[in-house]
Image (cartoon, helix red, strand yellow):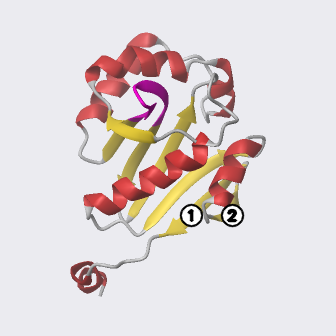
Amino acid sequence: MEKIWLRPMQIDDMDLIYQWANEPECRKNSFHMEKIPYEDHKKWFQAKLISKYCDMFVACREKTPIGQIRLEYEGDKALISYSVTKEERGRGYGGVLLKLAEEKVRDKKINIHVLEGLVKEHNIASQRKFEEMGYDKQKKGSCFCYQKRLEVKNENMVRMLK
């Protein structure tokens, strides 16, 4: 598989992310399935881009954007939301994005102990990716909640946990 890497999102990515977010399969797998109005997306995107509680990345294969991943921080959790472009689905990139997101959280050296993703019941591909990456699965309403505890390797972080 080609090398996949994450680059931080920029304001110039707003229209690309808007197109991806409104792609029919992406809407079907989202918790809010209706088409997103551009003005709503613009406000949301700008707010997320400057939030200290959110990191957003574009996944690239060489220079080609193939998807996106967002990490939203709540307490000691990082909530994961990701998507792969329709042209690139089915190639195993979802698992790569999850692995790269975990690395980003670890590199950030913040007090995050749990990665979490919510997946709709019919989204079998995402369920498989979370399971392949070692996430625990629990039923939560009409979806599944996947969680993975991060091991703390840094002594300073261990002291912070006590």
Which residue is rendered at x = 40% and y = 47% of the image?
Answer: 71
Q: Which residue is mark 2?
A: 138
Confirm or deny contact between disc 1 and disc 2 (CB under 8 A): yes
75 vs 146, nearest the viewer: 146
Q: Which residue is mark 1?
A: 147
The earlier-in-sequence mark between 1 and 2 is 2
Q: Is residue 134 above or below residue 116?
A: below
Q: Is residue 80 left or right of residue 121?
A: left
Percent position of residue 135, x then y: 61, 64
Q: Quadrant of the N terminus?
A: top right
Q: Is residue 103 visible?
A: yes
**Residue 78 appears left or right of 126:** left
Specify whether residue 60 is painted magenta. Answer: yes
SS state under label 1: strand
Q: Secondary structure at mark 2?
A: strand
The residue carrying pointer 1 sits among few (fewer than 14), some (14 to 19) or many (20 or more) residues within 10 Å by Cα, namely many
Q: In the image, which disc is placed on residue 50?
A: none
Tag in front: 1 or 2:
1
Query: x, y (%) of residue 125?
Result: 72, 43
User: Image quadrant for the C terminus?
Assistant: bottom left
Q: Please, what is the three-letter code of the amino acid marked with disc 1?
A: Gln
- Seen from the viewer's position, the closer of residues 62 and 49 is 62
Magenta-colored span? 58-68
Lateral position of residue 113 relative to residue 34, left or right: left
Work out how far the residue at label 1 is from the one at label 2, CA to CA, in angstroms: 8 Å
Against 15, is 83 above or below? below
Q: Quadrant of residue 77?
A: bottom left
The residue type indicated by label 2 comes to Gln
Q: Quadrant of residue 51?
A: top left
Q: Main secondary structure of the magenta part?
A: strand
Viewer can see residue 74: no
Disc 2 packing (10 Å; few <14; some 14–19; many ≥20): few
